[in-house]
Amino acid sequence: MKSLYISYSKENKKTAKRLVSKLESDGYSCWINPRDLPSGVRTNDAIKQAIDESELFILIYSKYEDSSEIIIKEYETAEESEKPIIPFKVGEIPKTISNQYLFNTLDWVDAHEDGFDQAYEILLEVIEEFTDEKPIKRTQRETTNNKSDKQQKQYYIAAFAIFAAIIVGYFLYDTFVKSEKEQAIVGTWKVVDYNDNLKRNKQDSALAAQNINAMMQNASVTFNDDFTFERIGFTPQPEIGQWSIEDDGSILFLEPEGGGQKDELFIKELTFSNMILSVNEKVNKMEVITLLTFQKQ
């Protein structure tokens, strides 16, 4: 059985390899992706089994882990399996509102501030508290952690609780933002303004103005609450298809039926009555940014 599961983002790959090398040289067995993925087994299934069979979950923690869906899923699996979780900080972490309490109240196994070697010694002490598996090769070391055993257990339990709250808050916030924007976007929207940065001569500008005015007279989009849409006035024939919103609420996706492509429109502003969308395109090797302003009918 692999006793330690090592979770890390791709940005911390070198640190993860270094940590695994030292732990295994000290007699601990580690499971790390992708090294220990068995052949013929689905990756998600193998990771879940490895976490379930591990005694302890070590999270190599920096600013990258909070935005990694893979790390978040691994963390949730460890939490569901009731595995002890040790955050091993290896880089700067922004003091956002969501983790301000974390920084002000907790002492971390901190390889960023204390240096890898000193933090590693502290990590070994914590591992021994949580796992029955003792290192085979490890010799007696002086502890570099001045906290009592009781204090160590208390702040790591607190770390587990706070980190869980951050993860839950992250998903609740994303879900709230996405849900609110989905509710706001349902309805029929008419184009009321059009702007782009495409350079035109005087004749082309006059022709473009006529086309834009004609389009705004007829162009509208209806978003239904079953995530279908109908787009009129942008093409010779009306278009229907599916719509969706990025998890963070920043991008609107339109996928017309039979079109074979998915349009990406960046949401610059969205209320229950007004919407501004940005479309980025390449025209003659130039990046053209178009802003479409809509009003709900």
Image (spheres, rainbow, N blue to C red):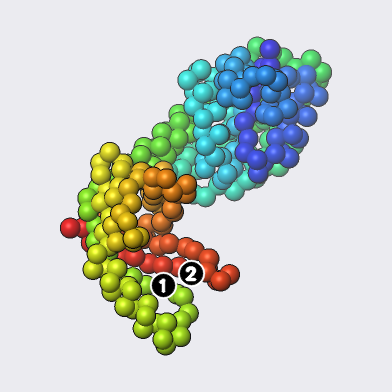
Q: Which residue is painted at 26% across and 59% down in the image?
A: 220
Q: Measuring from the top left, give residue 263's x and y in whole percent.
A: 43, 53
> 24 and 116: which one is in front?
24
Is residue 145 in view?
A: yes
Query: Could you tell me the amino acid type at mark 1?
Result: Asp
Q: Which residue is painted at 68% across and 12% down in the image?
A: 1
> 55 and 127: which one is in front?
55
Of the image marks 1 and 2, the number of the one nearer the N terminus? 1
* Residue at numbered disc 2: 288
Q: Measuring from the top left, give residue 104's x and y in whole percent.
A: 48, 43
Residue 284 drawn above or below residue 235: below
Left or right: where does residue 136 sit relative to residue 157?
right
Query: Could you tell me the amino acid type at mark 2?
Result: Val
> 156 and 151: which one is in front?
156
SS at circle 2: strand
Furthest-left residue in this view:
297
Residue 279 drawn above or below residue 126: below
Q: CA distance from mark 1 to mark 2?
A: 7 Å
Mark 1: few/some/many CA within 10 Å (<14, 14-19, 20+)? few
Q: Measuring from the top left, give residue 116's x and y in whole percent.
A: 72, 39
* Residue at numbered disc 1: 196
Q: Which residue is painted at 62% across and 31% down in the image?
A: 7
Left or right: where does residue 93 sit relative to residue 117?
left
